[in-house]
Amino acid sequence: MLVIEHLHKSYSTTQGKLAVLQGVDLQLARGASLALMGESGSGKSTLLHLVAGLDRADSGRILIDNQPLDGRLESAMARWRREGIGLVFQQYNLISSLDVAANLSFQARLAGRLDRQWLDCLATRLGLDSLLQRYPEQLSGGQQQRVAIGRALAARPALVLADEPTGSLDEACSDEVLALMLQLVGEAGSSLLMVTHSPRLAARLERRCVLHAGRVRAEPR
Amino acid sequence: MNPLLITLQALLSHWRRHRLQFFSIFTGLWLATALWTGVQALNSQARADYARAAAVLTGPGQAQLLARDGERFEQALYLQLRRLGWQVSPLLEGRLRIAGAHPLTVRLIGIEPLSLPSTAAVAGIAIPAFDLQAFIDAPGQAWIGPDTLQQLGLNSHEQATSSDGQRLPPFVVQPQLAPGVIVLDIGHAQALLQAPGQVSRLLLAGESRPLPADIAQRLTLQTPGDDGDLQRLTDSFHLNLTALGLLAFVVGLFIAHAAIGLALEQRRGLIRNLRACGISLNTLLLSLTLELGVFAVLGGLAGVASGYGLAAALLPDVAASVRGLYGAQIAGQLSLPAGWWLAGVLVSILGALLAGVSSVLRAAHLPLLALAQAQAWRMAQGPWLRRQAMAAGLLLLVALGCWQWGNSLTSALILLATLLLAAALLLPALLDGALAWLARGCRGALAEWFIADSRQQLPALSLALMALLLALAASVGVGSMTEGFRKTFIGWLDQRLSADLYLTPQDTTQALQINAWLAQQAAVTVLPGWRAEIRLQQWPVQVQGIIDHPAYPARWPLLEQSPQAWAQLASGRGFMLSEQLARRLGLRLGDSLELASDTLTVVGIYADYGNPKGHLLVSAGWLRAHLPQATLSALSLNLAPERIAPLKAELQQRFALDDSRVVEQATLKRWSREIFNRTFAATTALNSLTLGVAGIALFISLLTLSQSRLGQLAPLWALGVRRRQLAWLSLGQTLLLSSLTVLLAVPLGLLLAWCLVAVVNVQAFGWRLPLHVFPAQLLHLAVLGLLTSLLASAWPLWQLARRQPSELLRQFADEA
């Protein structure tokens, strides 16, 4: 489903060019899950942003169902983000002006794929039934992350990209949220690429790999 | 290091990274101070000049004797009174045309310093301080104000020449002397004005007593309480200017208030850290206050300097207005005391306190941990909106009270102020309600976000939108009033000024000679205008006597009239009066008035726009019989168009009348319209400036907001909304909020216009105007309001549209 070939990305800094990705190769099959680990600054989030179409690579290819992602116009990239993926961030990034119900359905409505039954199911499974009229600032961190997961899965995207989805939560809460996310990703039939620092959490995914010195080193289960 | 210094250093470091905010607060205080001090400079200058004029005329508390017919009289009467022991001093006044590179008509005042009361002062100089010999002896002295001397293009000790070739004494500059006035010895004045042996009035020292019978037939006593008209007459004009200045000041403070609030919001984290590090609340508040003080002084200094420039730019129009409306002279240049500059800076400090005190107090009252919560401020808006709505309700009650029971200009202005302030306070709640209503009709995800996010932006934009509402409503109100006034005034002028030629003879004798000569001319209709000046309830009133002629009913529009009004007036039983005088005297149709030991009935009330004095219309026969001091001061002529020019030329030649004494209808109308336009020039300029200030307020708020909006917009971009689309949506949000504000500003402006024509004008000038609505003007102002918003949002949106993805990415990534 997702194929990454020889991906390079660098940033200009005041100290000169900083090469973050130096030939990353990676594959993720449909319905599979992969944990991407690495030290801070190793380029995990950068890789995730490139796959999400939030940024562009210097060279190399990202193929989605054998179609290259690079070279697409901004409008096509926006459509990819809208319809093809679901994004979960560490800081939740919910829309503060909308209530939980509107946040949950937001991306599915943007993509034109609103499925009320699935949405109700998500709300129930995520324990958000009683919180639908609340606003993000009225929720705890764990509750906000559940809303973010629900929003990412509401349109049943082909690929879910999660950047430290439990990074702001305590251990117990992290386990609970991750378990729910894995279950629901499975039910939605989506693939999952998750960035995490935690080997414990990474172990719960089907595969894991480590980003080091700009390259991917796979770690067998 | 001192904790205060550390705190100040930390707080001030914010401005290095937020220069725009620094500029916003500075701009708000600067503009508020500039507009306020500018208006105050105009008023101070005008009032100082009125005081100078009053001081030159009589000196404070000076009684005087005047001829009953209002004209000059023989010096022999003065000598007769002196012989009878009266402490009187003669004074001769007249207008003199000075020739030269910069010709100018001045008011010449001849005095006799030897007989002046020792308590009197001329141009601020006490009599004992006079250099009598230099003043009286040849070549004498001509006292002149520095502004008038500059207008003439001459220097001190130079001698000017009058238009008929006579040389004036050398000029001596007297800083206190009113503009357009020259004071010299009465002997020189009599020669220059070609009035040998004549005086205009006698200044009286000591207590007044009954005049000898033979002199009482010629002269009348005017008590000290009767003067000061100029000050009284122009009060309304200056109060209106002050009200506009105050509005501009408030709009400017909105900018400062919004910027100070946002600066505090952005420094919540810093404030929390400072307090957590052991800085006491008192030290923190002292630092915030000191910081505010620095802004106030900087803004105040810039504002006072700009206010001076603004006043200097508007002064010619204001001078022309008061000259046209009240005949008052204001110098063409500003000369303000040092205290004015200091007062300007103090006003800025007061403004900064008003704008910043709520933010400082909010910082003091928020619990330590709450300071870190970014949403705390927004969450607090709900109760704040309710409190604002309650305050607005109270203000509306005050407005209602002023409308129902108010009977003064102050109450009328309080009505205006409370109405505007209540509307401004209600605006956020109304906008929130309107957006909530719109949200119910939204179906799409983006449409829903569009409205919800607009509601979220309201707290940050509400002050700027309030400023826009006030400025637009003021523009609609003042614009409708001005245009309505123009329409009414021009129509009224066309009816009233229907004679072909207007003559102002030099005196009654000449008028009678001209009248007799005109009677021999074929096909010329002459309408003589007899006039007398009287006082009713201490108010100066012009009484005009007219002959029974069909031209009057045709050309004299009446607001109210009794049946057979003109016939009753001609019979000498009835009289008509101006609307403002009727209000002042509380007279209605059918009421009676004791006038010159006769009782007359009110048979008509007419508009008399622009006349600060009262006006009465009676029959010429009655006037001459009951007020012997009446003079024949004007003749109106109707004749065939082709005869106007030859007759004018012949009149000028035969009776030595200059252009100012024989005026054609078109010229008179042009003068009147020019005065009208200049009267509202300063108002229009201040109005435009206020709208500009509101635009700046909106611009600064949007720019500041755009810097903190990335966090709101980045998730949408991540979810598949394009950057360009986001920019358009943001523009749409600004325009939606502005459009709703404009929609509210139009009815508010019309309400304001009604208040101006039906309440303020009645109290200020005594006349009520019909309320006219000009749809094209409303549309123009609405478009102007939206354009202002568009311009204000252009730069922030352009910045948003060109945001690089990397900047948006920073909202999500915590690693590269």
Image (cartoon, helix red, strand yellow):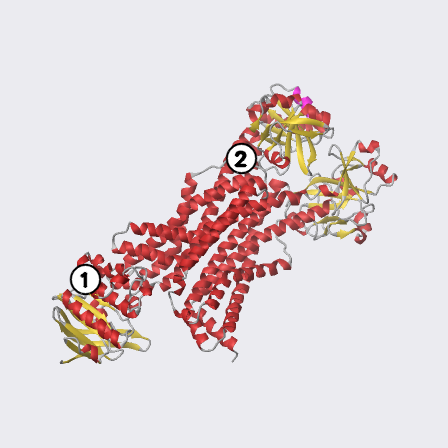
State how many labels appear.
2
| Residue B294 falls left or right of residue A119 | right
Residue under pointer 2: B489
Label 2 chain ID: B
Which residue is depicted at the point 69% across and 44% down? Answer: B228
Q: Nearer the viewer, residue B280 or B604?
A: B280
The secondary structure making up most of the magenta span is helix
Q: Give SS at disc 1.
A: helix
The quadrant holding residue B104 is: top right
The quadrant holding residue A182 is: bottom left
Residue under pointer 1: A121
Q: Nearer the viewer, residue A98 or A79?
A: A98
Regarding residue A30, the answer to whether it shows in the image is yes
**Tag 2: residue type?**
Phe
Over which residues does the magenta segment extend? B513-519
Which residue is depicted at the point 40% across and 42% down? Answer: B779
Residue B188, horizontal then vertical, whole percent: 77, 43
Residue A11, horizontal then vertical, whole percent: 27, 73
